[in-house]
Image (cartoon, grey):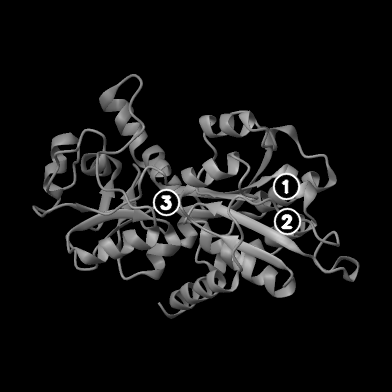
Amino acid sequence: MHRSRLVVAVVATAALSLLAVACGGDSESGGGSGSGSGGTELTGSIFATGSSTVEPITALAGESFNGENPGVDITVEGPGTGDGFKKFCAGEADIANASRKIKDEEAGLCQAAGVEYVELAIASDALTVVTNVDNTAVTCLKLEDLYGLVGPESDNVAKWSDASQFGATTQLPDAELKIFAPGQESGTYDSFVELALSKITEERVGEDPPKETRTYGGLADDNEIVRGIQSSPTSFGWVGFAFAEQAEVREIEVDGGEGCVAPSAETVADGSYPLSRTLYIYVNKAKAAASPALQAFVTYYLDNDEQFVSDAGYVPLPTEQLEASKATWAAVVSGGAPAETTTTAAG
């Protein structure tokens, strides 16, 4: 836990040390073509918004870059992936942090506004199912159990044991179910629906199944979710891997059909944890073309990605996937990015 607390402190320091910019402002280009290029000092501003899961990684990258380039003001916020894409596709942000891929409708908003972007994978993560540390009655949940607890049919499930009404097969405690989980603006919500619920939803509901959970009071920030989990001895929810690892919560193993697997750096890296996912940043191409500072920052981010990801408590990408992101970004900087990674259209 000591290392995790240091990570939180570093992120908090980053948030304090990065100077604020107006949310709607364009990046200002300064002299020079990159950090340390020709000895020319970079100036300008960079605004990153979106996923609260990705926020700590980008904040660490911003803090480190700002230390070497004090003339560049960097702001990183985390209102959620969906809310971040709204700002990004309106041209109000340089970077969108995302804990899932952009949706078709969001890509359509970008296209309508003339915002071209590049998608860059930056980390691996685990949707970590959590409960209170005192809830020792639950150690592993099947996908059917997750559906019974929070699937779209389970609005009236008031106790853990009630989940059996909607397909749960594990014997769950006869205890109040208190849900603390992401709201619909969160990419972590969307990822959970896709990875944990969609298969069972399709089997039970049939054609055109709802892409949603049951109704509950969604929370916008992972830290709020953690505090909620800690507040109730029979709580249930899910957060990004780093937040779970850094908090006093109990992580629940997940059985995707091949036995119970705990979330860990190893099981995320090898794909054996059923709720593993990829994290991304999206960069506005026009803003990057106009801002040497933004170009330099993204290059610096990717060049040091493994360190920032590890320090934030997440799992580094496989080498080939990170190298693909670097190659994609190098092509953008040189003006020849592949169309499939820079499209403004959906899909």
Q: Secondary structure beneath disc 1?
A: helix
| Amino acid on which the number 3 mark rests in the picture | Tyr
Residue to which mark 2 is pinned: 294
| Amino acid on which the number 2 mark rests in the picture | Leu
Query: x%, y% of residue 142?
Result: 28, 45
Say whether disc 1 or disc 2 marks the residue closer to the N-terminus. Answer: 1
Answer left or right for 110 relative to 157.
Answer: right
**Location of the C terminus (image quadrant):** top right
Say whether disc 3 or disc 2 marks the residue closer to the N-terminus. Answer: 3
Real-space CA distance between mark 1 and mark 3, rounded to the nearest whole angstrom: 37 Å
Seen as rendered, the residue at the extreme top is 207
Q: Secondary structure beneath disc 3?
A: loop
Q: Residues within 10 Å of mark 2 (few under 14, many from 20)?
A: many
Query: Which residue is found at the position 69% from the left and 75% from the top?
Result: 67
| Amino acid on which the number 1 mark rests in the picture | Lys
Query: x%, y% of residue 276?
Result: 46, 49
Residue to which mark 3 is pinned: 273
Q: Residues within 10 Å of mark 1 (few under 14, many from 20)?
A: many
Query: In this orientation, which residue lies closer to the viewer: 116 or 180?
Result: 116
Real-space CA distance between mark 1 and mark 2, rounded to the nearest whole angstrom: 8 Å
Say whether disc 1 or disc 3 marks the residue closer to the N-terminus. Answer: 3
Query: Which residue is found at the position 76% from the left and 59% from the top?
Result: 293
Query: x%, y% of residue 268?
Result: 48, 55
Instruction: State if disc 2 and disc 1 touch (CB < 8 Å).
Output: yes
Residue to which mark 1 is pinned: 287
